[in-house]
Amino acid sequence: MSKYFHITTYGCQMNVHESEKIAGILSEMGYCACEEIEDADIAVFNTCCIRENAENHAYGNIGMLKKLKARKKDMIIAVGGCLPQQIGKADVLNKKFPYVDIIFGTHNLGKLKEFILKRQSGKKTVVEIEDGDGVICEDDKPLRTSYPNAWINITYGCNNFCSYCIVPYVRGRERSRRSQDIVAEAKALIEEGYKEITLLGQNVNSYGNGTDDLTFPELLEKIAKLDGKFRLRFMTSHPKDFSEELARVISENRKICRAVHLPVQSGSDEILRKMNRRYTATDYIKKVEILKKYVPDCAITTDLIVGFPTETDKDFGDTLNLVKRAGFSSAFTFVYSRREGTAAAEMEGQIPEEVSKERIMRLVELVNSQTRAQSAEYVGKTVEILCEDFDKKRGMFLGRDEYGRMAYFASEKNLIGKFVNVKINAANGVSLTGDVADISE
Ligand code: 5AD
Ligand code: SF4
């Protein structure tokens, strides 16, 4: 009889890819993926703690499993990732959810098989959190779930210590994978038929950092020169390390998408200083200008935080101005979330929730108006879309152009994994709809 696993993933792309690695381990052990958690013999929660609501979301979902576990005593529940990696949180989880079988951190995901076997051999709750930075394991074979897209880690961890951010505490110092391993992985994926490769790191621009012969622009160019028709993306770029050399490499290699995610966080110099971002609003705009000089049509997306401690109306106004000046094509907007253990958590001047809520509404409205205006310009044009999925509710296929804009279109044939030229006939806010003109590959 088949045995099943189910993984619930919270947070960023990094976690989505790590869940693919967890899925790889479980399928090697003979488990198959199932859609409903009720059917699972092993349920894994791959958690995130970047904001309080991500953490609460995981707590809520784990709590809901109590009844199921009471009915299915042999079911194994494992909670891993960033949440238990925080100091003291593994104990909190263990006390709050005594029916959880395995608690593991970000640095020992590769040992999940060992933890499962330990638990199955009768040991009570297995709690395994490793401190330090974790080793880079090249043996994990991810069970990829996002064809035609494939994620590749190039760095792990982060050295930047932005004052609001928990990531350096739960993912350790920055480590780079060897460039030859990364290039070999990309080559193999393209040969397997993947059409979009995304290089992942908390700050891809500091790749190598003295430990590899290649810098990030060199690595990117090497992958962009591999044979085959594919798209190449990367994220995330810290603006302080975004170089002219990188802008040049993007402009000279057509396989690299004209889309850069460049989180600015705030438009106020004072807030940026307190955030320990190590650039000013003017420095940021200069980076945008360099990028646009080399790649005039490049779409730039960003992350923004409102309600950072001491943020005044004037600081917030500076953020609105910067959003207008940079001309972002879209943005992820967040209300500042106080994270225990970070420098900002100790700062005076925490902002009341109602002030942050009002600010984020105004910010979202501005970002949306820019996104809508840019979408409207697509109408009547034909764009190349990489078909990624089928939306059952709409009964349409969907995919993105190289700038990251989502488009929906109908087709009798399955087009997932194909490059499709789509004539755009309507723009509805963030996304577009159109008709298939032809299929290029
Ligand atoms: N509160 C709100 N947003 C945060 N981010 C990181 N830490 C916090 C926090 N404590 C946001 C940043 C980052 C993105 C991944 O998450 O904008 O770029
Ligand atoms: Fe967090 Fe800053 Fe590192 Fe990004 S660069 S993960 S925001 S500390």
Image: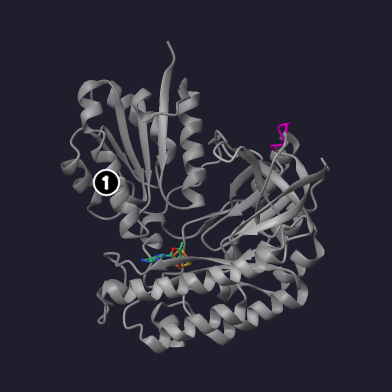
Residue 408 vertical placement versus 7 (above, below): below
Secondary structure category for the residue under label 1: helix
**Left or right position of 186 against 320:** right
Residue 274 position, x and y percent, is 38, 81
Quadrant location of the C terminus? top right
Position of 258 with respect to 438 (left or right) is left
**In the rendered view, does 26 fall on the left or right side of 194?**
left
In the image, residue 11 above or below residue 352:
above
Q: In the image, is residue 59 part of the stretch drawn in magenta?
A: no
Instruction: Provide residue 43's location: percent of width, then percent of height.
Output: 35, 31
Looking at the image, the residue that sits furthest to the front is 426
Q: Position of residue 179 (x, y in %)?
A: 66, 52
Is residue 247 shown above or below 129? Answer: below
Residue 414 within the segment the image draws in magenta: yes
Q: Quadrant of the N terminus?
A: top left
- The residue identified by callout 1 is 59
Q: Residue furthest top?
A: 1
**Amino acid type of the residue tagged 1 in the rendering:** Tyr
Q: Position of residue 312 (x, y in %)?
A: 35, 86
Residue drawn at the location 72% of the way across and 63% of the way down: 258
Please say whether residue 85 is visible from this viewpoint. Answer: no
**Magenta stretch: dominant secondary structure:** loop
* Residue 286 seen anywhere in this rendered image of the structure: yes
Q: Which residues are magenta?
A: 412-416
Q: In the depicted view, which residue is nearer to us: 171 or 381? A: 381
Q: Residue at x 74, y 58 (%)?
A: 256
